[in-house]
Every structure is written in structure tokens, then in C-alpha cells.
Amino acid sequence: MGQRRRLSLSLYLNYVVHGFGLLILAQNMTNLASSWGVTIKMVSFIISGVGIGRLLAYLITGYWADRLSRKLFVYLGMACYFVFAVGIVMSPSIPVAYVLAILAGIANSALDAGTYTTFVEMNNGNGQFNVLLRAVVSVGEFILPLLVSFFSHDGRWYGWTFLIMAGLLAINAVLLMPIRFPKRPEVTSSSNQDSQGSRNNPGRLIASGAFVIYGYVSMALMIWFTQWVTLFGENSQHYTASQSHWLLSLYSIGSILGVLTLFILLGRNVGEAKIIIAMNLIATGSLIMLVLSHQLVVAEITSFIFGFSAASGVMQTGLTLFMKLYPQHRGMVTGVFYFFGAIASFTVPIITGILSDISIQMAFAGDIVIGIVAVLMAIIIALATRNIKFVS
């Protein structure tokens, strides 16, 4: 197996583990609350530490990823996730657990800074393989609940899910050790001139602002849906618990198929701006139909379509286009983009929690506003970048 393929497989395996990391605290809330002798509300507070960790780290890891090795940051992310996974099940106190949750957020930012930039540089500026990261995360998100259910059903210790996560990281660290990462391409003088010229282009500044906002809303759109669709189904639409959970499963299935679709489109050099406009229009339209309809079959179809569009890797596609504006600073661009995504992961639970005091339907329907803003940002990006000569 070639170096490039081995590197890709190891990077993708890290994002299977990242899929574990996104859900593992929430999926074990009851067990952790019992183990620590606290309420579920306190465990939920600890989960917010992941968002804090991302906020603290994204700009720092992005800045240094452009100056140090990409491999260093991939290993840093793996190490932080390993300490988190092992530490949580050994944690003697809530403050220690909160620090470990922050460490998980730092792990996320370090992996992103080292991985997204590596895939773009492996493929001459094309973000086709970055899109697959979304599908790989979905695989991890699909496997983890099954593991939690398996250990719970057999009455086994919940901590095995954390140790499996740590074991995968340890194995991958060994596999990754002898593999060389690609050298960052030299930016030619002509590329520098193009970059300098476009730096004075008002469209570049407008696009940069829109990309920053898009980093927030594209993340918020997914978090909002996954956090509330089950409760919306049960409380507002009066579906059964299994039917409401099935909506989230359909979202995940749609996400994987959407990723494969985007992978094909990007491989055929379909413009990123066209993709993000189309996918956000589809996502927002499906949300509106889901909220207005009271038919289960419509809810199932629209949940699938929402996953297919909003969680298809369209956020990563936006990041790839953003990188093309600043090819010399891909790590920093990744850090800035996901910094605002981290703000979304921290603020969406707060905003939706306030809206839920009015009603569950209001809390869920607020995602439509986010979808509309995402469409507007995608259109602004397309218009602002139409005359810019990109440098891969």
C-alpha cells in the first residue's frame, strides 16, 4: 500500500474516533452522573467544556500549523483525545472531568488544523477528500451508540466505550509513525502577486467576512437539528420515541449519501460556490417542510434530505474555498473558520434552551432562520469571489 493511501486511511481513522468523541459524553450521561454522584444537568455542563476547548485552541493551532509540521498537530490531537478517553473513566472529580472535556475540544482543533490542510495539499488544492471526513465522522457517530447499547444491555461497565476509543488511537499512532506527510507546496512569486492583487480586491474582504459567518451558521445548522429533532418529533409532532429517534438515523444515512455525492461532484470540478448555494437551499427548504408538516412520512423524507444536504460535507466545501483565498495560510484559515464553528457549538445549546422555554417547536423551528442566513452567506460568497483568481 502506498504512502499516500496509508496516510489517508490513518487520517480517516482519527475521524472515526472523533465521531466517538462528539457523542461519547452525551451517550453516557446517566452512567457518568451515577459514577460521579451528580445530576445529569451537571454532566451536561461538563459537556460544554468541549466547546470551550475548541474556542481556546482553534486560532492557536491554526496559526502554528502553518509554521510547524502538520504531523505534529495530528499527533497532538490524538494525544489529547487519548488522555481524555482514559482520564474520564478515572476522573476523581467534576473539575478534573471539566478539564478533560476542554482537552477533547483542543483535540478536535488540533486534528482539524493538521488534517484538513494535509488533504488539501495532497490533492493540489482540491477539497474532494476533505468532504469524506464528514462521512467518516458519521460512521463513528453510528458505531458509538451501538457500542453503548451493547455494553448497557449486557450490564457491562460503561467505561469500555472510552477504552475502545483510546485503543483505536494507540493503534493508529503506531501505524502513522513511519508515514511521511506531504511537503507544503511552495508559493511562487506569480502566486504571491496574484494573492497581493486580490488582497486589495473588495470582493476578497466581503467574501472573508461571509466565510467567517458561514463557519458559524453551517455548524449551527447541524447542531441545532441533531439536538432537537428527536424532542420535536415526540413533543410537538407526537410521534413515538422510536419514530423520533429514527428521524435522526435517517439524517445520518442522508449525510453519508450526501458526502458521496459531493465527493463525485468535486471530483468533476463542479464549483464549490454553486455547491454550497444549492445544498443550503435544499437544507432550508427541507427544514421548512419538516416544521410545517404533521405527517410522519414527510418528516422521514425531509430528515433524510436535510442530512443529505446540510451534513454532506458542505461546511468542509466552504472551508476549501476559503483556503483558496489564502493559500499561504491554510492552517490559520482552518482555525478561524472552525473557531466560529466552535462558537456555534457553545452558543446553540444556550439559544435553543431559551427558546425551549417558549415551546419545543419554537426551539426547533429557529433552525430555519439559521438556514436562511446560510443561504444568504453562500450567495454573497459566490458573488464576491466570481472575479477573484484563486491560487491552489
Image: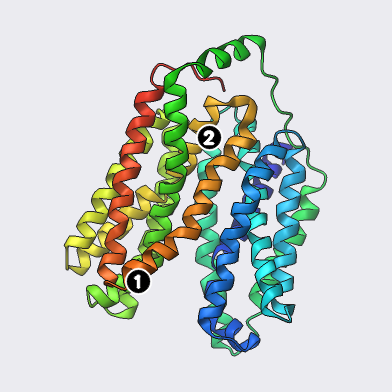
Q: Quadrant of residue 193?
A: top right
Q: Is 374 placed left or right of 30 in the picture?
A: left
Which residue is depicted at the point 25% across and 53% down? 286
Residue placed most toward the observer, 327 or 122 = 327
Which kind of residue does numbered mark 1 sit on? Thr
Q: Is 162 placed left or right of 245 in the picture?
A: right
Counting from the top left corner in percent of width and height, residue 141 is at 52, 63
- Binning the other alpha carbons within 10 Å of mark 2 as few (below 14), some (14 to 19) or many (20 upward) gives many
Query: Can residue 180 be seen in the rendering of this structure?
Result: yes
Query: Label 2 near label 1: C-beta < 8 Å?
Result: no
Q: Is 45 placed left or right of 258 in the picture?
A: right
Which residue is depicted at the point 22% across and 73% down? 237
Q: Is 221 placed left or right of 292 in the picture?
A: right
Question: In the rendered view of the protein, which quadrant contains the N terminus?
Answer: top right
Counting from the top left corner in percent of width and height, residue 288 is at 22, 55
Front: mark 1 or 2: 1
Q: What element does badge 2 sit on? A: loop
Label disc, if present, on residue 357 of the rendered structure: none
Residue placed most toward the observer, 30 or 205 = 205
Counting from the top left corner in percent of width and height, residue 172 is at 74, 55
- Binning the other alpha carbons within 10 Å of mark 1 as few (below 14), some (14 to 19) or many (20 upward) gives many
Q: Which residue is mark 1?
A: 230
Q: Which residue is mark 2?
A: 127
Counting from the top left corner in percent of width and height, residue 121 is at 64, 31
Decide: is 205 above or below 19: above
Which kind of residue does numbered mark 2 sit on? Gly
Decide: is 24 above or below 54: below
Query: Can residue 156 be seen in the rendering of this structure?
Result: no
Which residue is depicted at the point 26% across and 72% down? 359
> Of the residues under marks 1 and 2, which one precedes in the sequence?
2
